[in-house]
């Protein structure tokens, strides 16, 4: 492990830095029971201030969806109607499914390319649970519901926002 | 140490990076996007003479190539649609610097350089958030699969 005091690259697991003798014993991981961690477990994911989810209907064309992603400056749209979500379509889908044949598919409906039945969570579950879901499922975005009805959407960036909500002074560059 | 000191003292290298997937500035947009698809990466580094000159992401593909009013064609050079001189992080900088650049800039990828400006790779926000989740492993990973199934009322009797 790298000593944070002198940058010396020690073998993993040592308790003192071989070069400067600083105590490395408690550096490996943060103590548990910290407020930032307690908040993750105890507070609902709603605390991340979810963004309003942008919804398009299943027959919206790929060209229109791309316009929406660009003009609204968002990374994904939900596909469905009246609070019912049928699918999700993201920038990643544009790269993998669209980018090599834009002309051919521009007028096709988004429903042909979306990911069906995306994972969603009730906004009352803990932040830790949502973080687990996103981390394990490899999701960038996660739609949130209240009593089964779409309420908003969170992204990975919102978790950085959570960290900085504890230490606003660190957010400056 | 508390979490605040942790992100102030630990270095960016601690997060680990993905080795760079890169093209030369003269590469065509078509070839570059093909490489992104093949390697399944959201971000390409544009490198000339071992020096980072730009970055090209999924977002740039949307805004500058596929959007209705985008002027670029797939035969154009990647240098015409890349973001030149991107925001970077150094491997020996404090973790908080990386977090804050990513958060403030809304970047999903940040290139990582060593002290001599050599390109080491990229760090994605996915990697950063997973890294943070690992620091709270007990809180994040030791959870019942469906918390709503574990009510507060006692069952039976």
Image (cartoon, coloured by chain):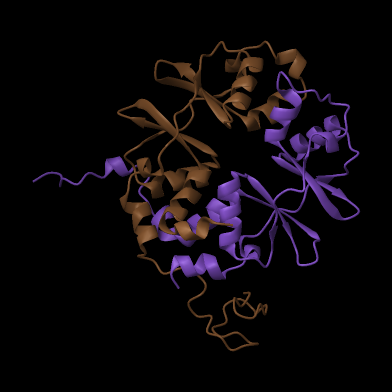
Q: Is residue A61 above or below residue B93?
A: above
Q: Is residue B108 left or right of residue A24?
A: right
A94 lies left or right of A137: right
Q: Position of residue A173 (x, y in %)?
A: 59, 57
Q: Is residue A61 visible?
A: yes
Q: Above or below — where is A43 with respect to A141? A: below
Q: Quadrant of residue A100?
A: top right
Q: Is residue B41 visible?
A: no
Residue farthest along the left direction in this orientation: B157
Screen quadrant of the N terminus of chain B: bottom left
Residue B157, image x, y percentages: 8, 46
Q: Is residue A55 left or right of residue A45?
A: right
Q: Is residue A69 above or below residue A166?
A: above
Point 44% across, 29% down: residue: A52
Figure check: A154 above or below B13? above
Locate residue A68, reporting x and y percent.
59, 21
- Chain (brown): A
Q: Position of residue B30 (x, y in %)?
A: 84, 29
Residue drawn at x 64%, y 22% is A66
Q: Colour of chain B?
A: purple
Please name the residue shown 22% across and 44% down the image.
Answer: B151
Residue at left offset 64%, top offset 32%: A92
Residues A163 and B14: in front is A163
Q: Quadrant of residue B92?
A: bottom right
């Amino acid at each position: 492990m790298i000593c944070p005091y002198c940058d010396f690259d020690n073998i993993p697991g040592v308790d003192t830095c071989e070069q400067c003798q600083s105590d490395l014993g408690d550096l490996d991981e943060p103590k548990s029971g910290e407020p930032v961690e307690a908040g993750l477990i105890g507070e609902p994911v709603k605390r991340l201030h979810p963004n309003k989810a942008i919804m398009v209907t299943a027959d919206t064309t790929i060209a229109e969806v791309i316009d929406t992603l660009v003009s609204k400056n968002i990374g994904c749209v939900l596909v469905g109607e009246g609070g019912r979500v049928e699918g999700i379509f993201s920038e990643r889908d544009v790269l993998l499914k669209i980018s090599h044949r834009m002309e051919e598919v521009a007028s096709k409906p988004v429903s042909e390319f979306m990911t069906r039945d995306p994972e969603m969570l009730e906004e009352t579950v803990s932040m830790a649970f949502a973080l687990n879901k996103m981390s394990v499922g490899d999701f960038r975005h996660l739609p949130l519901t209240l009593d089964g009805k779409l309420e908003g959407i969170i992204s990975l960036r919102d978790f950085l926002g959570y960290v900085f909500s504890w230490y606003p002074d660190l957010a400056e560059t | 140490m508390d979490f605040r000191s942790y992100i102030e003292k630990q270095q960016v290298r601690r997060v680990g990076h993905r080795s760079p997937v890169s093209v030369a500035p003269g590469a065509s947009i078509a070839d570059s996007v093909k490489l992104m698809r093949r390697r399944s990466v959201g971000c390409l580094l544009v490198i000339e003479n071992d020096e980072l000159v730009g970055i090209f992401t999924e977002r740039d593909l949307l805004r500058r190539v596929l959007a209705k009013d985008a002027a670029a064609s797939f035969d154009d050079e990647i240098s015409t649609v890349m973001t030149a001189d991107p925001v970077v992080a150094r491997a020996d900088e404090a973790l908080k610097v990386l977090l804050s650049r990513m958060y403030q800039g809304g970047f999903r990828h940040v290139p990582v350089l060593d002290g001599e400006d050599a390109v080491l790779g990229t760090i994605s926000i996915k990697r950063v958030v997973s890294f943070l989740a690992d620091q709270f492993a007990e809180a994040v990973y030791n959870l019942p699969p469906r918390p709503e199934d574990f009510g507060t009322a006692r069952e039976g009797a």
